[in-house]
Amino acid sequence: MSGCFVLVMIAGVAALVMGFVARDASDPTDVTWGDAFYTITSRQSGDAVIYDFSRGGHVETSLSGSTDTLCDSPFIRRLDVDGDGTVDVLLFSCGNYSYLTMQDGVLNEILIGDDLSSAAGLATAWADEVDRAGVTLLGAGFVVFVSGLCGLISLDAKAHARMRHQRVQRLHR
């Protein structure tokens, strides 16, 4: 019986790990394409946030998001936008989307606009979870883990009570 509670706890830990991965992808500070590691930094420049992608200390490319008061704040997300199995960096800026991807060893920004039908990777549950910064998985993982832990504790308490009862019965014989 305790094995079931241990499995529940393992499922909770798995959900927690996935939640932390989603949280990391919701506001990334780095991205890796193949063996190329890029650091992502942001800076304010007038009415824009500039996201610089640096490799070896040199900025190789940048994405820009508008901070105009009529627009929602820009953001980036690290996930597979186009559904090709490789990571991309999605940029939301003023109601429009674009993403940065590596194609044939070259960084390319692909403009999507507001029609997301070409972005198959955004229609997934994982993209929704990344957008929520892993909150659902973190919450569920915590609840599942604590449930398993409580189950183990109650089994342990029952076992101790049973052993105590048996000792008392032996003493009264």
Image (tube, grey):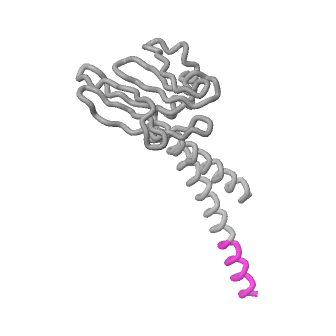
Q: Quadrant of residue 52?
A: top left
Compare residues 68 and 131 and report the one nearer the observer: 68
The stretch of residues the image draws in magenta is 160-173
Compare residues 26 and 99 and report the one nearer the observer: 99
Q: Mainly helix, strand or loop, the magenta region?
A: helix
Q: Does residue 165 appear to the left or right of 95 in the view shown?
A: right
> How many numbered discs, if any?
0
Compare residues 133 and 148 and report the one nearer the observer: 133
Residue under the image location 61 percent in, 24 percent down: 104
* Depicted 64 relative to depicted 165: above or below: above
Residue 162 x, y percent position in the rendering: 70, 72
Q: Does residue 48 appear to the left or right of 124 in the view shown?
A: left
* Depicted 23 relative to depicted 119: above or below: below
Quadrant of the frame with the C terminus: bottom right
Residue 98 x, y percent position in the rendering: 45, 20
* Depicted 52 relative to depicted 162: above or below: above
Quadrant of the frame with the N terminus: bottom right
Q: Does residue 137 appear to the left or right of 75 in the view shown?
A: right
Residue under the image location 32 percent in, 28 percent down: 73
Residue under the image location 61 percent in, 39 percent down: 35
Residue 148 x, y percent position in the rendering: 62, 54
Residue 157 x, y percent position in the rendering: 63, 68
**Magenta includes 166?**
yes
